[in-house]
Amino acid sequence: MDDYKVRVEFRKKGGGTEMKEVTISEAIQEVFEQTMLTIGTRLPNPMWHLLYASTGKCYAFNDIEKLSDKNCAVLRQIMGDYVRKRKSGEAKSQVGDNSDMLSLFLQSPDIFTEEVIIDELIDFLVAGSQTTQFTTQTMLAHFATNRASLERVRAEFNSVVDSPKDQPIDEVLRQNVNMETCNELTYLGYVIQESLRINPIAPMTSPIHFEKDVTIGGLHVKAYDPIMINHSSLQRSAVYWQEPERFNPNRFDESHPDSKTPDGTKRP
C-alpha cells in the first residue's frame, strides 16, 4: 500500500499546520507522533476521563487532540477504501496464493469485520515502521557514544558472517543474513533489547477497563475507569534495574553481574 498517496495535516516547526500529500508510511509516522502527544494531554485531563468513562468516546479538548483525531479518521478512511477494493476484486493481492494477512482476514468475515480489519492493518503498519525506526535510532545514538560496543557488534557480525572485504555490504546482507545467522548475533540481540527498554516504542499501553469494581494488590479500581500500564516507568525502575538511566546491553546477559537487580537477585 505504500504507493498510495494520502493528504494529511502536518505540524510545522514554527507552529501551525500544513497539508501534505505523502505515502502511507510517512503519514503513519506523523500521525503516530501526534497520537503520542495526544495521550500526554488527555491522560492528565479529569474531564476526558469522566466523559470516556460515561460515553466510551474520546473527546478532543485542544488543537493537537483535534488534529490527531482528524488525521486518524483520514487514515481509517484510506484503509477502509482499500479493504473494500480488495473485497470487490478491484485491487489484487501482490503475494502468491493470496497468503497475505489481509486475504486471510477476508476469508473469515464472521470473525474479522471491516472495522476489525482496519484496526489490524493500522496496527501492522505502525508495528512494521515505527518499531524499527525508533529502535534503530536508539541503537545508533548508543553506538555514537560507545565505540567499544560498536566494535563488539562488528566483531560478532564478522565472526558469524564470512564474506570478502571488497564485497558490497548490501550483497553481504542479502546472501548471508537469515534467521539462522541472526540467532547467532547474541550481543546485537542484547543491544536491541536494551534499546527497547530505555526507549520503548509505546511508553504506555492502550486504555483498558474492568466491567466491575476490583481490587488488585491493594489498589481499588472502579468499573470502567480507564487503566494504562506505564512501560517507561517499569523499564526504568531502580527497583529492578541497576543504573536504569544508563544504556547497558550487558544487563540482558544472564551470566553478567549487571543482569541482576540492585539488591543482587535475579530480575523477574
Image: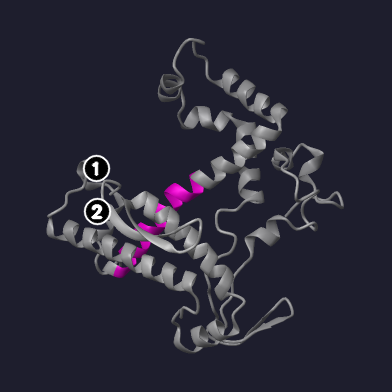
Label 2 sits on a secondary structure element that is helix
User: Can you give x and y, in whole percent of width and height, for residue 10 in the image?
Assistant: 41, 59
* Figure quadrant of residue 185: top right
Residue at (53%, 19%) from the top-left corner? 161
The span shown in magenta is 115-132
Q: Are marks 2 and 1 in contact (CB under 8 Å)?
A: yes
Q: Check disc 1 and give the amino acid type.
A: Val
* Figure quadrant of residue 156: top right
Disc number placed over residue 95 in the picture, else none: 1
User: Can you give x and y, in whole percent of width and height, for residue 98 in the image?
Assistant: 22, 47
Q: Tell me: residue 235, above or below residue 146.
A: below
Quadrant in which the C terminus is drawn: bottom right
Label 1 sits on a secondary structure element that is loop
Give neighbour class at mark 2: few <14, some 14-19, many 20+ (Cα, 10 Å).
some
User: Can you give x and y, in whole percent of width and height, for residue 133 in the image?
Assistant: 50, 44
C-alpha gap between disc 2 and disc 1 = 9 Å
Give neighbour class at mark 1: few <14, some 14-19, many 20+ (Cα, 10 Å).
few
Q: Nearer the viewer, residue 211 or 137?
A: 137
User: Can you give x and y, in whole percent of width and height, for residue 29 in the image?
Assistant: 44, 53
First in residue order: circle 2 vs circle 1: 1
In the image, farthest residue toward the bottom: 54
- Which residue is denoted by mark 2 in the rendering? 103
Colouring mode (rainbow / by chain / secondary structure / one colour): one colour
Residue 125 is one of the magenta-drawn residues: yes
Residue at (24%, 66%) from the top-left corner? 109
